[in-house]
Every structure is written in C-alpha cells, then in structure tokens.
Image (cartoon, rainbow, N blue to C red):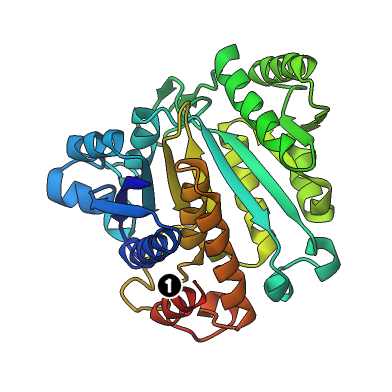
Amino acid sequence: MQANIVVLPGDGIGPEITRVAQNVLGKAAEKFGHSLSFDEQLIGGIAIDRSGTALPEATISACKSAQAVLLGAVGGPKWDDPKAKVRPEQGLLAIRKALGLYANLRPVRGYSELLDASPLKRELVEGVDLLCVRELTGGLYFGDRQEPADASDDARAYDTMVYTGREVRRVVELAFKIAQGRRKKVTSVDKANVLASSRLWRAVTVEVQKKDTTGISLEHQLVDSCAMRLVTNPGSFDVIVTENMFGDILSDEAAVLTGSLGMLPSASLGEGTMGLYEPIHGSAPDIAGKGIANPLGTVLSAALLLRHSLGLEEPALAIEAAVSKVLGQKVLTRDLGGQASTADVEKALLSAL
C-alpha cells in the first residue's frame, strides 16, 4: 500500500514528537512492505504567526487530499490571550469540522510497567482497558453563544448545548460497532435528569440498542456518578460513549489512571476512513526544544492511524509491541520517572521494530 499522511506538528513540543512518530510510522510500514509519504502543514499558533489564521486553507486542502492526518499539539503562552480574535485552539475545532470528524476515540490502558506511577492503588488500575468515545462536532462547543461585554454584575453570557438525533445516533452506533470487537459492553453517559439534550441522547441510544443483534450490553450513567466510578472502579468500564463536553472532561480524568498524559493516544474519525490522530496532552511549552518530551502518546496515535484509516493491523500491532518493549527496557522520559531523552526513546523504538 502507498498512502499520503499530512503531518501537523503545531506548537511547543509538537514538532519533536511528530518527528519521532513519523519516523516510527515509516519504519513500521516499510517492514511490512508498505510505503508512506508525509506532507507537513501548518496549524495552531505557528499558523497564526505565519498566515494570520489558526487553520490556513492550504492545510484544509492538503488534509482532504490525504489518507490520514497526524497532529502534534497547539497553543502556548504567546497566544494565551482569551480575548484574542484568533486563537490556536480554533484550528482544532475547525479541522474537525472541515473533515467531518464526529467521534473521538481515547483508549486508556494500564501498562504493567507504569502502574506504580498511577495516583490510584495498583489493584484498581491493573487490567484497566477502556475506550472513551466522545462526540466531537455538537454540544456546547458549537452551539449559539453570547460573549460577555465586561465583568459587571449586569454582564450576560451563554453557551447553548444542541444535538440532533442524527448526531447522537452516528456516534452511538460507532461505539456499538467498536464494542463488538471488545468486551461487548457500552456505558452511555448523560445528564438526563436535568438536560433536555441528554434526554434526547438517552432516547436515541435506547433505539440503537433495540436494533443491535450482536448482544451488546448497554447501561446508562449520569455524568457525575460516572466521574466518581472512574476512580473507584475503572476496571468495570469497556466502551464509554458520551457528548462533547462530558467526553472532554471524562477522557482527561480517565487519562490520569495510567500515570501520565504522555502515554495516551487518540483518534478522531468521520464517516469514511479519514481520521486525525493526536496525543491527548498539550503543547508543553515549558519543555519545548529541550529534547525531553515523551513521544509515546503520539507514536501510539500513529498505530491507531495505521489501524483505523489505512487498515494495516500488522504494522499497528508492531508499533504497540515496540512501545511495550521500550517500557519494559525502562527507556523512560522524565514524566514516567526516567531520564531518557526524546532521542533515546526514538532510538529504542526503531531498534524494537
């Protein structure tokens, strides 16, 4: 197979970690007789500096022509003014919308070599293997809003959470499809005791289950109790599906279970095979350029890219096995309790492949 991948390094440590992931991707693909080409484009703060927008039209065009997109991170102190008309994060929302990426997948797996780094007791996180499926293009982040004119007592602001049945159905159906290849359990998270949009979410989810013929088990859980259960009994989850803001919060909470945000990948998927793949951590401007960033979340995102967008399971498994081997060899960056550099981890990964 030949495929073109757009790489969006972004800001902070983004260029460092995507460079490692790109090299690992190329090596894994070559090992199994495939050829990948890479096209680097702008997004985020660096795009604002060079073009005045967080997502240039050239980037959108390149992404639409590619088979998949690999993203680093966006943002940093230079662009932190919340009153600025153009902000790096706008690039993320815009690329998801432009590519029709409606579902974000965040797998959370407890690696045995890292369990002692978790803030939870080892027995709670051992064996944890859950997947958060977050709706990406609806809800509060995309509804009508009013910005405050000032900070006075009379100032007024609002954000609107809006969902359609179609938006709910497609992401819930995806969660059910993924659960078929896992432990066949879906937890749908909402706030149906308070929110009208959540009552629609629950009603549509029930309809999806009625049409399921594969024996998927469905449970409904309110978002606040789900947040508590994630830290008291995380092993009880298989696939969690929820709306945009709830998913944003819960998936970050679940990420802490592994002991480091630097380990967790994500995939944003649409109707076809196009996907955008990125680590869930931020741009870490405090360590940018120091050569100590953990690239494993990005590397594992690259494995998801091979699996979901290119249908290449063997090289995806090879990358995941290489990550496990590197962890077993204790080639760990500082966030994981080691002293290895980004280059050390890359060298170990390539050797393991």
Q: Position of residue 5 (x, y in %)?
A: 32, 48
Above or below, 93 against 121 in this view is above
Q: How many marks?
A: 1
Label 1: how many Cα within 10 Å (few below 14, some 14–19, many 20+)? many
On the question of residue 73 being in view, the answer is: no
Q: Quadrant of residue 35?
A: bottom left
Q: Quadrant of residue 326?
A: bottom right
Reading the image, the residue beneath label 1 is 293
Q: Residue furthest bottom?
A: 339
Q: Amino acid at mark 1?
A: Ala
Tell me what residue is drawn at x 75 percent, y 14 percent. Answer: 211
Depth check, front residue: 20 or 245: 20
Above or below, 170 against 81 in this view is above
Q: Position of residue 187 (x, y in %)?
A: 76, 35
Element under label 1? loop
Q: Position of residue 290 (x, y in %)?
A: 34, 79
Drawn side of residue 197 relative to residue 66, left or right: right
Q: Position of residue 253 (x, y in %)?
A: 65, 52
Tell me what residue is drawn at x 46 percent, y 55 percent. Answer: 302
Q: Residue furthest front?
A: 33
Drawn side of residue 245 relative to residue 115, left or right: left
Drawn side of residue 181 relative to residue 315, left or right: right
Tell me what residue is drawn at x 37 percent, y 31 percent. Answer: 99
Q: Quadrant of residue 162?
A: top right
On the question of residue 343 being in view, the answer is: yes
Tell me what residue is drawn at x 70 percent, y 38 percent. Answer: 240
Depth check, front residue: 62 or 91: 62
